[in-house]
Image (cartoon, grey):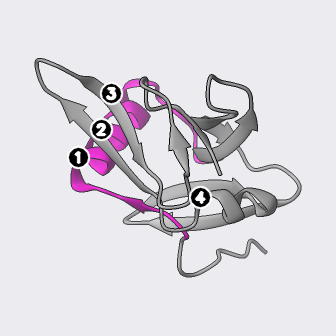
Amino acid sequence: METIASGAPVTLTEGAKNEIKKLIIQQELSEGYGLRLGVEGGGCAGMNYILGFDQKKDGDQEYLIDGIKVYMHKAHGLYLIGMEVDFQDGLNARGFTFSNPNASKTCGCGTSFSV
C-alpha cells in the first residue's frame, strides 16, 4: 500500500499546475509517473533544481498537490521547504521558475542556488 505524505513542503502556482497537467497529457505519462522535485550539486551557485517526470524511487516522499503526484527524496526537503514553483509564459521569459526562501544566493538563470 502506498503512503502519500500530507502537507507538501513546496507549493505550485496555478500556472505551474496547469502547465504540468498539460505536459502529463502531451507526454502520455502512465499512472506510475509523477513530478520529481529535488536538488543536485552543480550550477553556478552551487546547487541545481531538479524538475521533471519520473517514477517513485527508494527514499522518496510522495505528495499529492491538486491531483499531481509529486516525488521528492526525503533529504531534499531541507533545501526546498517553503519553495514555490511557478510557470512564466510571457514575452521576456518562458518556463518554470523557483522562489526558494532557503536560498542565500541565486544565479541569473534562476535554476541554481546556494544555502
| Residue 19 x/y as whole percent | 30, 38
Label 1 SS: helix
Compared across the picture, whether 95 is left or right of 11 comes to left
Pointers 2 and 1 in contact (C-beta within 8 Å): yes
The alpha-carbon separation of the residues under discs 1 and 3 comes to 10 Å
Q: Which residue is mark 4?
A: 80
Q: Which residue is mark 1?
A: 15
Magenta part of the chain: 9-32
| Residue 13 x/y as whole percent | 28, 56
The alpha-carbon separation of the residues under discs 4 and 3 comes to 19 Å
Could you tell me which residue is drawn at 68 percent across and 63 percent down? 77
Q: Residues within 10 Å of mark 2 (few under 14, many from 20)?
A: some
Q: Between residues 7 and 111, which one lies in front from this camera angle?
A: 111
Q: Earlier in the sequence, mark 1 or mark 3?
A: 1
Which amino acid, by three-letter code, is at mark 3? Gly
Task: Please tell me in which quadrant of the rendered image residue 92 appears.
Answer: top left
Q: Residues within 10 Å of mark 1 (few under 14, many from 20)?
A: some
Compared across the picture, whether 85 is left or right of 61 comes to left
Q: Between residues 96 and 107, which one lies in front from this camera angle?
A: 107
Tag on residue 95?
3
Tag on residue 19?
2
The alpha-carbon separation of the residues under discs 4 and 2 comes to 20 Å
Q: Between residues 113 and 55, which one lies in front from this camera angle?
A: 113
- Establish if 9 lies above or below 94: below
